[in-house]
Amino acid sequence: MKALEPALHSAVTIMTPLLFAATGGLFCELAGMLNIALEGLLLAGAFFSAAAFYYTGSLAASLAAAAAASLVLSFLLAASALKLRSNVFIAGLAANLLAGGLIAVLSHYLFNTKGVVLLPDIPSLPPLDIPLIKNIPVIGALFSGHSFFVYLSWILLLAARLVLLRTPFGLRLRSCGKHAEALDSLGLKPETYRFAAFLISGFCCGIGGAFLSLNLGAFVPNMSSGKGWIALVVIFLGGRKPLGLFAAVFVFGLAEAFSNYAQGRLNVPADFILALPYLFTLFAMIAVSVFYTLTKR
């Protein structure tokens, strides 16, 4: 069991940006608006977080810039889909393309490079040990010794569960996805709650993007590496429920941790090993689809 602890600890770190993105995406999905711009929102948060830290040296400013950038992009997406009545999928793809293109231009203007932006003198994110459980085998590796971002992602997920299931706002937002006409008959506008869902999604993705760059100590082009797309899969694998979502992202974290461990240890092509998390995503979707099909017969 001791040999498993590094992999479990790594899996929790890897799953953190996925959890941020999936938590935000869950609000949009329950509101009846699938947000396929999670990838671009993560990338925007990562870049503006790195840029803010580069010029200010402040972690607080870095987080604020990441959240603000993703909020602006999600606002544009929401305005396009809800106010201008554009197709939400086309608008989401446009947001992803806008994020990538704008970041390349700004990176060249601000740092004179379209490549890696190193963050000088960035402090490492200190691990937070939980005294009562840090020495417990396996449990300690799972729940102790992580950065504050990890625990923040858990707190946001719990907060999302409370908001969605225990508040009038959550009830009305979930009604947008299933009974929008009933909500409209009460004099409440579904678009208002869907707009809020997009903004919540942007905020969560911004913090997730900040974790990507601050944890690495640099911004790397396309460093989101498909995590926004995997987060969409996670939402459905988790049954569109917060606790199911947590279980799904942990499984994906384990898959990527295994691929990192396997590099240099298995006599198979490196490209195949790097593709393992994405292959797992594909097979997981197929398995869940088959399961739902069989159970509905």
Image (tube, grey):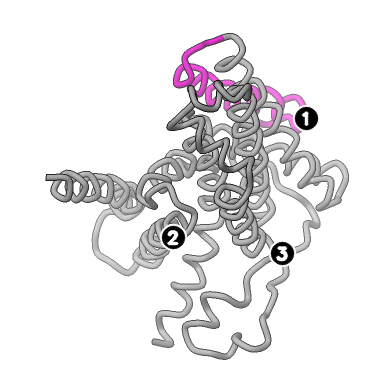
N-terminal-most mark, 2 or 1: 1
Vertical relation: 150 (above or below) 231: below
Label 3 Cα crowd, 10 Å radius (few <14 / some 14-19 / many 20+): some
**Nearer to us: label 2 or label 1:** 2
Q: Nearer the viewer, residue 116 or 235?
A: 235
* Residue at the image point whose x is 50% and y is 42% from the top: 26
**Residue 205 magenta:** no
Circle 1: residue type: Leu
What is the tally of numbered marks visible in this picture?
Answer: 3
Image side of residue 250 versus residue 201, left or right? left
Q: CA distance from mark 2 to mark 1?
A: 33 Å
N-terminal-most mark, 3 or 2: 3
Task: Give the label on residue 229, or none.
Answer: none
**Residue 96 magenta:** yes
Residue 180 in the image, given as x and y percentages of width and height: 49, 26
* Residue at the image point whose x is 34% and y is 65% from the top: 262
Which residue matches tag 3? 125
Vertical relation: 127 (above or below) 209: below
Q: Nearer the viewer, residue 106 or 176?
A: 176
**Nearer to us: label 3 or label 2:** 2
Q: CA distance from mark 3 to mark 2?
A: 19 Å
**Nearer to us: label 1 or label 3:** 3
Tell me where the magenta segment starts and ends, as one range.
85-113
Circle 3: residue type: Leu
Which residue matches tag 2? 253
Image side of residue 155 versus residue 18, left or right? right
Which residue matches tag 1? 110
Residue 283 in the image, given as x and y percentages of width and height: 24, 49
Residue 278 in the image, given as x and y percentages of width and height: 33, 47
